[in-house]
Image (cartoon, rainbow, N blue to C red):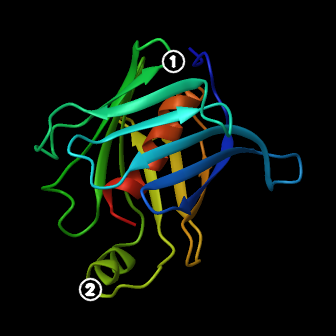
Amino acid sequence: MNAPMHLSSFFVSQRLTMMVNRYEIRAAGADGKPGQLMALAQQKRLAFKEQVTFYSDEERTHPVFSFKARKTIDLASGYDVHDEFGNQIGFFRKDFGRSLLRSTFHLSGPGIEATGQERNVVVAIARRVVDFPFAFHFDFVDASGQPVMSVERQFSVRDRYSVTVPDPRLDFRLAAAMAVGLDALMAR
């Protein structure tokens, strides 16, 4: 079964401002480069309870989806992803136990359960030791080992990601929330 809003590839770029982290999400164009604006997201810095809202426009007048922490302080509790009407469309959480060497996340949505982990253990360890903008990759697979989603951080000072979603069951909104969540939760 295909997700109601599937997008096979898109890009996420971060813009830093004084009070918020802003993320721009663009569909991949026919040339493979960032194309149509799909959403803008905003994460308040130093917020007591993590919430990120995605908007369809630069003026941030039309929210289209969001994610919010289930609990205020318990980082392992996870994040619910909601559509524009407040209906839950998915969930993700960081697996802190498995993340000691390689960051690991769990992603759930209608008809899909996936686990994502950093592809390269050497880069994962180096990221923990050296403050350097390493390129890194997350691969999400379902229980049968089939690829669901990949997030690749491009080597740059500014955070930029290319996201590939080969599994048509994964809703774009949940994939975009997870991609931004990776950046936000890893304090990039």
Q: CA distance from mark 1 to mark 2?
A: 39 Å
Residue where numbered disc 1 is placed: 84
Q: Is residue 25 above or below residue 185?
A: above
Q: Dot 2: what SS?
A: helix
Looking at the image, which residue sits at the far right? 31
Q: Residues within 10 Å of mark 2 (few under 14, many from 20)?
A: few
Residue where numbered disc 2 is placed: 129
Q: Dot 1: what SS?
A: loop
Q: Amino acid at mark 2?
A: Val
The picture places residue 125, in percent across and down from the top left corner, at: 28, 79
Q: Is residue 141 above or below residue 83?
A: below
Residue under the point 12% across and 56% down: 97
Q: Quadrant of residue 74?
A: top left
Looking at the image, which residue sits at the far bottom? 130
The picture places residue 130, in percent across and down from the top left corner, at: 32, 88
Left or right of 6? Residue 16 is left
Q: Which mark's residue is nearer the viewer, 1 or 2?
A: 1
Quarter placement of the C terminus: bottom left
Q: Amino acid at mark 1?
A: Glu
Q: Is residue 169 visible?
A: no
Q: Quadrant of residue 8?
A: top right
The picture places residue 168, in percent across and down from the top left corner, at: 60, 27
Q: Quadrant of residue 36?
A: top right
